[in-house]
Amino acid sequence: SVSQLCLELNEPTVPLVQSWAGQHGDWECVTSAERQPDGGREILGFLWNRAAGVELLPLPAPPDCAGMIPSNGTGASCRVPLLVRQFKVGAFAFTAVNVHVRPAADEGTAVQLPPLGPALLSPEIDGVKGGWPVLVLGGLGAQAASALGGLPSVLPPEAFTDIGKEKPGGSRAADGVWVSSSVKERHTGGSAVVRAGLSSAWIPDGWAWGGFVSDHCPVWAEFFTD
């Protein structure tokens, strides 16, 4: 879990982590509730290094910001797990949104998402004051383009973010980083999908070993903060 990763970074027990050169940092994390409004048990979280100047700002909202985003014009609503927090790095303050929609086993039964972009940029979302730069992290799969129509991605469209033994280069863009225009202006142009070091001889792979820690690859993007 995110909490376990945070503890390991602050008080390392794994030899490889203990052997890191230089400062290990001062890590903190925040997570959503263990049970989401849609009944799922998936936990969303943020992990940051205070020693690098990242500061969590006070948020006038419940600890679990997973909530309801209304579907425009229909009166219906779609439960979308969200974790929303505000951070400050140097002089740059922004709203970070962690969102992940689990893919349906049957594509014909997939939940159709309402447009999330306008909702995230609205004057208020679960107590978060609007008008701030917005950075969205997570997975929306094939619906990202329509759900986040107003937010551009900082990853190239051909960047696959999944991984597996049969297709180590990936086959779908499952995850991404989307930003509002004010954050896009700060993007250095640097971003990538991490594929190295995601497997281990100690991770089961069916009846064999050498599996991957996850079928999702980490992604990174670089922004100016001053």
Image: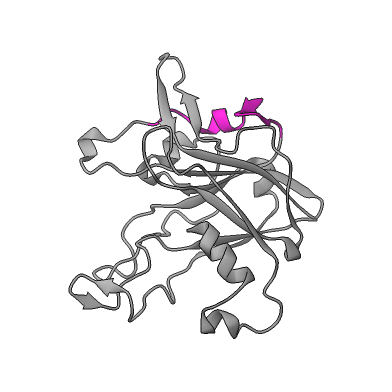
Q: Is residue 58 above or below residue 176?
A: above
Q: Residue at x 42, y 71 (%)?
A: 195
Is 210 rendered above or below residue 54? below
Numbered marks: total: 0
Determine whether, in the image, residue 168 is placed left or right of residue 190: left
Visible in this render: residue 201?
A: yes
Kindly tell me whether residue 191 is visible in this rendering: no
- Using the image, determine if residue 51 lies above or below residue 182: below
3 in the magenta segment: no
Q: Residue furthest left?
A: 207
Magenta residue check for 126:
yes
Residue 31, image x, y percentages: 55, 48
The residue positioned 48% from the left and 27% from the top of the image is 68
Q: Is residue 33 above or below residue 91?
A: above
The answer to which of 112 and 151 lies nearer the viewer is 112
Task: Identify the image quadrant of residue 214.
Answer: bottom left
For the point 58% across and 52% down, the residue is 46
Foreground residue among 95 and 22: 22
Q: Residue at x 41, y 72 (%)?
A: 198
Judging from the image, the colouring scheme is: one colour
Residue 15 placement (x, y as % from top left):
53, 84
For the record, the magenta segment spans 113-131
Residue 154 spot, x, y in % from top left:
55, 53
